[in-house]
Structure formats: structure tokens, C-alpha cells
Amino acid sequence: MAAEMALVKPISKFNNVTPKFLIPRSFTKPRFTSVRMSATTSSSSSSSSSKKGSKKNINETLLTPRFYTTDFDEMETLFNTEINKQLNQDEFVALLQEFKTDYNQTHFVRNKEFKEAADKMEGPLRQIFVEFLERSCTAEFSGFLLYKELGRRLKVQTFLLSLCAKHFFNDESFSVIAKQDEARHAGFLNKGLSDFNLALDLGFLTKARKYTFFKPKFIFYATYLSEKIGYWRYITIYRHLKENPEYQCYPIFKYFENWCQDENRHGDFFSALMKAQPQFLNDWKAKLWSRFFCLSVYVTMYLNDCQRTAFYEGIGLNTKEFDMHVIIETNRTTARIFPAVLDVENPEFKRKLDRMVVINDKLQAVGQSDDIPLVKNLKRIPLVAALASEILAAYLMPPIESGSVDLADFEPGLVY
């Protein structure tokens, strides 16, 4: 019980980890490489290279950052003011004004600290930090593409929604740091990769990656959660490193305080979308879907991060405590709008997550073994069944009834 109670302690308690990797004083610089993240995996391609650089493939798994698309015709119908004449657009007007203000217009300005910090990294810490930048850039770029399509495809009858979406992105080239929010974030992260003599080929990424189709209401649930959980991840890391500057291995973390407010505003945008369509929030199906997406997002993050504990230990965090802190705070925020959420503060929820980690590690070991495909698949069957059983058991835990479609008094500005 003491272990579970420690999870809700302030973030300053997360610095009880001695990092496995120290930053050496010097290293040999590799040549600049353009990284293409493809949708398929080929064992032979990992060693191939060209004059322009090498192509790096990634595995498409449930834990990989994904690209999304939706039914834009349905989105048009939902928010078309000629069809829905009673549609309340007051909140969109307020949000649009916030986006136009662009609080972080001059925030994402690099300095010489970035390259100097990158030059000091070597070995495992350098490798895992590059992976962090790659995954983060891919996730931000995914949001950019979705919002760009919203802004481009929605017609004049949904002009406010379209304008809000357009203020998430910039039409200009990604060769420079982009103008606003998702595009700016992705550009800033990709510029960070250049400090390590790498760069993501975002044009290739747009064409090569698989797109997952979600109906609009599922886009609302999933994107709201991803933005709010992004807020709590960024602000938690920022606060921790502000209190423990000895773990500040790269200056990008100093930008997280303002960065996370972009994520918060994006989440408020999707909260407004859901409140404008109360059928997505006020029936039994909405409660089931809300719990499903909460569980999907929380489990994905927990399993992902537990595969990358070296990164979090490298910045002085205990991975599982960090994740539970983020999950708990995200769940409390989500309870303001979702009609039902998971009881993540029940100690049994964390125990289920930890059992999922053990099972997932065994699945990873099977995939990396030298067994023939048939044997691998046979070994996976009981493990997949066990993982599905744990996920189902977590979903069926008694939920917390929450949310309201009338949330004017609860809408946050700055939540810290």
C-alpha cells in the first residue's frame, strides 16, 4: 500500500533514481543522416545506405505513434451551421481569439546550448534521446496533418471550426520552424535532431506511413486525451528538471512550460467540439467509449514508457511513478468532460498495468528470438490471451461517474 500511495506524492519525489548514463566530455561526431521512418520493416534495409543518407525503418505496432484520418463529410454535417442552426459557437469564437493571440510566437527560439548539449551526449543516452526526439516529432507531425486536413476540408458553413483548425498549423515548408502549434512543435523537434546530425524526412513520412481511420467522435475522444496527457507529461518533466537541474541534459526541456499550454489549449478545442455535440457525452454508449479510450491511452503510454526506462532514468525520473502521476492528473482533468472515467487511483489498477508490462516484455522477447515464425506465433498465443485478459479486467473495474455537458464553470485557463 505504501508503494501505491507514493504515486500521488509531489513530483519532487521522483528524483530518487540514479541515472544509468553519464554525459561524457567528448565524442566523435557522425556524419549527417536523413532518417526515413517507413511503414514496413525489412531486415536487409537496416544496413543499407545511400549518398543522401540511410533509411531507418520502424515496426508498426499498437505502441507506435500513428497517423489518423476521419470522415470529413460527417464532420462537415456535425458542425454545419446551415444544418445545425442551434449550434453554439461562442466557445469556438473564444478559442479562435486565443489561437490568434499566439502566446508562444517568440518562444521557440534556439540557442547555442542545443548543439553544445548534443555534442556532450554519447553511447546509450545519446541513442535513447534521439529515439525520444524521433517519436515526439512523429507524434506532433501526426497532429499537424490531421489539423491541416480539418482546416482544408471543412467548408464555409463550418468556418469557425475550420479557422480554429487552421491555427494549429502553417502552410509553409517544414525546412524552417513552422509558424504555429503542431507544425511549430514538429519543426522544433526536427531541428533538435539536426543537433545529432539527423533529420526526419517528413515529406516521405506523410506518404509512406499508414493512416488509421477513426470516426469523428472517436477522433474527439482520442485527441482530447492525447492533448491533455501531453500537457501533464510536459509540465511534469519541466517541474522536475527545474527542481533538479543536474538532470537537465538538453535544453529542449526548458521550453516545456510554455509548450504544454499549447497542448492544453488544443485539448480545450476538442472539449468544445464534444460539448457542441452532447450526444457524444450523455448516454451509456458515451460512457463505454470514454472508458475504452482512457484505458487505451493509459495502457499504451505505460507500456511504451516501460520499454524506455533508460530515458526517464537518464533525466532522474522513476518511470512508473512518473507515468502514474501523469495518468492520475490526466484522469482528473478528463473527468471534467467525459461522462465516465477509470478508477486509476485504485491500487489494483496499477497492479494490472504492471502485470501487462511483464506480459508485454515476454511478447517482445518472443519477437526477438531466433525461433521460426510458426513457433513464435504459437508462443504468442497464451501471452496475447493473458494481456487481453488483463486489459479487459482493467476495463471492467467499477468506473467513476463524472462529466457534464454544462462545463462553463470548469473550463481551465492555466491549470497550474
Image: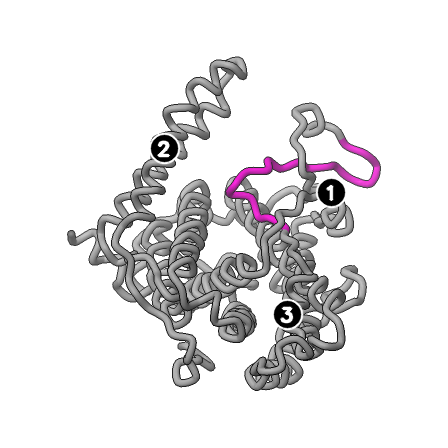
Q: What's the distance in space between the residues labelled 3 and 1, CA to CA?
A: 24 Å
Residue 305 drawn above or below residue 334: above
Q: Earlier in the sequence, mark 2 or mark 3?
A: 3
Residue 306 visible from this viewpoint: yes
Residue highlighted by disc 2: 359
Q: Position of residue 247 (x, y in %)?
A: 43, 58
Residue 33 visible from this viewpoint: no
141 sits to left or right of 284: right
Instruction: Check if residue 343 falls in the magenta segment.
Output: no
Q: Residues within 10 Å of mark 2 (few under 14, many from 20)?
A: some
Q: Callout 1: helix, strand or loop? A: helix
Q: Position of residue 27 (x, y in %)?
A: 61, 44
Q: Position of residue 389 (x, y in %)?
A: 33, 36
The kind of residue on which mark 3 rests is Asp
Instruction: Check if residue 65 falls in the magenta segment.
Output: yes
Q: Which range of residues does the magenta coloring cover?
A: 49-67
Q: Earlier in the sequence, mark 1 or mark 2?
A: 1
Q: Position of residue 274 (x, y in %)?
A: 51, 70
* Contact, mark 3 vs mark 1 (Cβ under 8 Å): no
The kind of residue on which mark 1 rests is Ala
Residue highlighted by disc 1: 208
Q: Which mark is residue 181?
A: 3
64 sits to left or right of 318: right
Q: What's the distance in space between the residues labelled 1 and 2, CA to CA?
A: 31 Å
| Nearer the observer, 120 or 156 | 156
The kind of residue on which mark 2 rests is Ile
Magenta region, main secondary structure: loop
